Amino acid sequence: MKRALSALLLAAAGCAHAGGPSSQQPKPAASATVPVPPVPFPSTYHPFRSVPTLIRGATVMTAAGQVIPNGQVLMVDGKVAAVGQTVNAPAGATVIDATGKYVTPGIIDVHSHLGVYASPGVDANSDGNEATNPVTANVWAEHSVWPQDPGFVRALENGGITSMEILPGSANLIGGRSVVLKNVPSRTVQGMKFPGAPYGLKMACGENPKRVYASRGPSTRMGNVAGYRTAWIEAAAYRRKWDDWDANGRKASDMPTRDLGLETLAEVLRGHILVQNHCYRADEMAQMIDISHEFGYHIRSFHHGVEAYKVRDLLAREGIGASLWADWWGFKMEALDETNANLAMVHQAGARAIVHSDDPGGIQRLNQEAAKAVLAGRQAGIDVSENDALRWLTANPAWALGIDDKVGTLEPGKQADVVVWSANPFSVYARPEKVYIDGALIYDRANPNLHPVSDFETGLLPAEAAR
């Protein structure tokens, strides 16, 4: 809704400052005084303090095509200032000797429930599924995120995760808004919100909504589809109502009543919110694409697409990403028909392959998940370069979240979200040694003072923590 509200505010400003003698203008349009609500819950994130830093001597994997042996990365004012074999650093810059190590962009997870299913995993911390109605587009994941979840720290120190999308769960046909976060310590979720990142909309296919709503519907896949279509019909009507109000002078007396759920769906139809669609089976992905065509929205990425390989050409043609596990399968019927070469096959077809976690443990080893998928691809005769595999973890997820102009590759001008690895990141032995977010050193394995600890853990006495 951010952009729509901004547009309304700009329109109002345009009316107020229209040219010509003001005396000949009609009385200021009622729209100028319409109480348009401010953008709610804005990001309050501010980068941590950074100093000019040169990392030298490492193998620099840019995810932009270049792998630079004995390369250098310069970070200044929170941005990547230069990358190359030889880089001139400003006087006084901190120099990190990373000889023998590897440097990559920060790792991005497009599918996480950290904060909404926080650790410890007890009912009191279970805030990820608003399983009260098949369509809950009115809920926002950020209102469940607990910033003290220790999982954020684990994802940082073990996985090199610098950004992630927190999604509501998959109980519902439409589960609500996601939020993109920077993985930094903060007292509030607003302090973690990635500035400028668009919201996502969580949708879910198949068995989950069937199971959850079996007793009151939808209880079949055809019931699921009827539910999606009904919601989009209502959203299209809601959008037309607001567009008409805007076109007809925005009179306060005619202002439509806000509906939080339809407001979110209308913003999807306007292209301002990106659809992240949980969907396992190939035939259902095709069905969801047909529905998106019917109502004029675009699916950004299918998540958990165990059968994505069966429609990889369709995904490539439609410009839809595939957010996948390396080898999760068989835990339910719709997850049965899997191949470990899924990611490689999708990549080979020209679609954007993405490794995701959906798991507080998996988010700590996405690099290893990618390595497994590369091996499976090679065994299937598909050779994936390390640069392309790294893009499964950085550039492609950044695209899926609409932040690829800011992060995802090591290129001058991008935000300096950077990981220094102890070894090749596709090795099972590789560990993040230093993690920079916007050029600030957030985690340093060699410095205990730079091991973030959540307030939740700080409050435990050693004996309690050991229990």
Image (tube, helix red, strand yellow):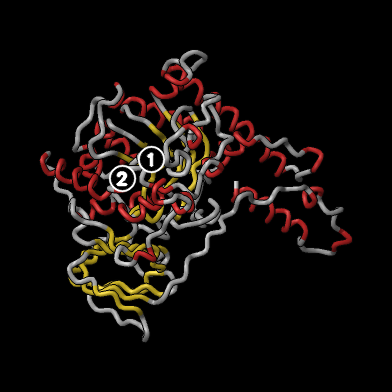
- Look at mark 2 in the image and give the residue it sits on: 354
Considering only vertical position in the picture, is 38 above or below 323? below
Q: Residue at x 24, y 66 (%)?
A: 60
Depth order, front residue of 318/130: 130
Examine the rendering and report whether any part of residue 227 can be seen: yes
Q: Residue at x 49, y 55 (%)?
A: 194
**Local crowd size for mark 2, using a 10 Å CA cut-off: few (<14), some (14–19), many (≥20):** many
Examine the rendering and report whether any part of residue 298 can be seen: no
**Secondary structure state at the residue bearing disc 2:** strand
Q: Residue at x 40, y 75 (%)?
A: 76
Residue 301 numbered tag: 1
Q: Residue at x 21, y 42 (%)?
A: 344
* Type of the residue with mark 1: Ser
* Type of the residue with mark 2: Ile
CA distance for labels 2 and 1: 9 Å
The answer to whether residue 236 is left or right of residue 57 is right
Considering only vertical position in the picture, is 424 above or below 79? above
- Nearer mark to the viewer, of 2 and 1: 2
Tags 2 and 1 touching, CB below 8 Å = yes
Depth order, front residue of 180/466: 466
Depth order, front residue of 44/405: 44
